Amino acid sequence: MKNIFLAAIIFLIVNLTLTDKIHAQGSELIGGNLLNGAILGSSLAIATMGLNNDWNSRTFQIGLGAGILAGTGLAIYDVATLPQGQQFFISGVFNDGRNSSIIILLDTAYGAALGSAVGAAFSLIGNTSFVKGIQYGASAGAWTGFGFGLIDCFGIAERNRDFMSDLFNRNAIFEYNSKSMSIHFLEPGLFAYHNLSGNTLSIDVEPALNIVSLKKSF
């Protein structure tokens, strides 16, 4: 019985070791989204309290809980949409990241920073409370940044599948295209030539790699 128990323990340890790399990507996505979701929910709760000028722990608790739930949903979405065998990557308007929630979180932070600057400016111009100007400006900016972050994350940002699709649709490894000119580097192609052997004329086709290809329209 003891030998069976020891064998089961050894099997479990070996299995966990071998599957560590397989589950590392999923664990990273889940953990990152949960953490960012919690921070985002807490930040929006503070922004809500700032707009209402009503500071209470209940609002913070609701925001934290909602953020964790949102982070869980984003984690499931990221894992479900990740192409097999690829490292997750997302590129937004202002930021790049390794999970979806970081795009929303950073856009929210930028909105809060910009809003606090605008609020401070209006308080100086209107000769009102400087602290209140920053409070309301940062709070409104955080919610505005959050709204833009949602659009950025789900409507604008490029993900792994977008990068792969773009790569397969390219004519070359590196390319630059404009209305009147295109430059391609390392462009695969086919080279056809006539081959006359005795009384036989044939056309031979061989693969080729163009180092630099330049096309100009006038």
Image: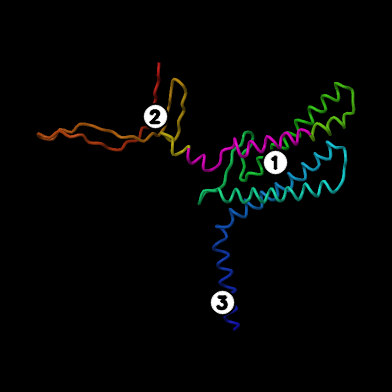
Image x and y of residue 197, in percent: 13, 35
Image x and y of residue 163, in percent: 51, 39
Gap in Å between the C-alphas at discs 1 and 2?
42 Å
Q: Which mark is residue 7?
A: 3
The span picked out in magenta is 140-165
Q: In this view, does 87 lie above or below 189?
A: below
Q: Which of disc 2 and disc 1 is earlier in sequence? A: 1
Q: In this view, does 12 lie above or below 186?
A: below
- Name the foreground residue: 40 vs 192: 40
Q: Name the residue under label 1.
A: 105
**In front: label 1 or label 2:** 1
The kind of residue tagged 2 is Val
Horizontal side of residue 131 vs 184, given as left or right: right
Q: What element carries label 3?
A: helix
Q: Main secondary structure of the magenta part?
A: helix
Query: Is the C terminus in the top left, top right, bottom left or bottom right quadrant?
Result: top left
**In front: label 3 or label 2:** 3
- Kindly indicate whether the residue at mark 2 contacts the one at mark 3 (C-beta within 8 angstroms): no
- Name the foreground residue: 78 vs 27: 78
Q: Going by the picture, which residue comes out furthest to the bottom?
A: 1
